Image (cartoon, rainbow, N blue to C red):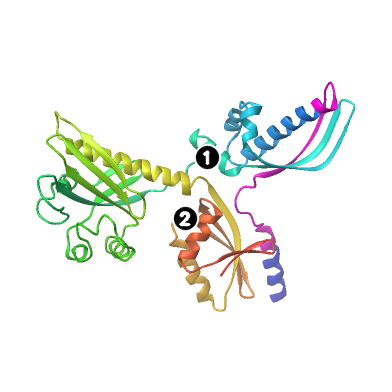
Amino acid sequence: MKKLFVFCFCCIFLVFESFAEVSFEVGVSVEKEADNSAQAKDEAIKDAYRDAFLKVAARLTDKTNVDKLNTLTDEQLVHFIKETNVVAEKSGGNIYIADLNIKIDGDLLKQYMLENQMMEIVSEPAEILLIPTYADTKYNGKVLFEDGNIWREILLSKGIIKAGNLTIKVIEDNLSNRSFLTPDNAFYMSEDVFEQVKLINKAKNIFTVHAVRAGAGNIVLVIKPYNEPEKRLVVTDETNDPFEKAVQETIDYIYNFMRQKDVNESSYKSKINAYFEYHKLKDWLDLQKTLNNIAQIKKIETGAMAGGKVSFSIDFSGTIETLERALKDNGLTLIFENGHYIIK
């Protein structure tokens, strides 16, 4: 019985064929006849590029979008070709025949498809924590939880703000937040302060938004996502309250920032199959718990368990590199060995 179970485990594990990112390399065969062999080769290579390009694109999107990509000219399409290797070729008279391996520039193709709404953007609901600081050009210094922060009061008056799949909340004024945050360190937050604020508020996406009243109808906004460059905006409204416009500018910026983040990190869904070696069943249960708490990982499916090994699949957002970084941040290592992924 034990031998049968091990045999079944091996069979199931082989069925869990390992695959990570979409392959951007494809083999094509071409045969072209023209007025002479040089012209035949030129036309054959163009056909090969188009064939390879469309085959790779079909791995990322549906037929409708592949048809759209097929409208690109030969001159446009050649920019997506990263590498061409000739496996075999025959040329003579007015004929050219060849087998080629062609590699497509995956990053360029994905970016083009994303910009032209040809590929699904994996966009998950997210909560945003706003830390609003304020200053007035008539007075020195800035405020956060202190009296006089009218910028925070205006944002609080909006309640919980919804923008697409985002929920935007203003940080609470409580002893825990006051013990770590000041008007000065809120903007250029250290890692230690960020970790404390993240823990206290159960928030991963933190934006500090500094507003400066610069005259009756002007607000200078400085928006800074944690550990990212700041964005400076000048909001002007001579007839109405510029703070209302500042609120909308803040929401628009955060929404677009998070959408671009989705494009960069979660441009398409990926899947790998892996295995994990354990000494005790608790080791596997602990790993499952850790993996389920990683934001990039969408789903884990267990295959078979035997002899201190468990096979499983991971559905995740983004590239294999983003998954590796996420695992590393949680004390885990992803290794590709003998045709399989191993988590240690």
Per the image, the residue denoted by label 1 is: 111
Is 22 in the magenta? yes
Per the image, the residue denoted by label 2 is: 296
Question: Which quarter of the figure has residue 250?
Answer: top left
Q: Which residues are magenta?
A: 12-39
On screen, residue 60 versus residue 198, left or right, reads: right
Spatial separation of the CA atoms under disc 2 and disc 1:
20 Å
Camera-near label (2 vs 1) is 1
Circle on res. 206: none
Q: Is residue 134 visible?
A: yes
Amino acid at the residue labelled 1: Gln
x, y percentage for residue 6?
A: 69, 71
x, y percentage for residue 234?
A: 24, 37
User: Which quarter shows the C terminus?
Assistant: bottom right
On screen, residue 253 versus residue 30, left or right, reads: left
Of 228 and 129, which appears nearest the observer? Answer: 228
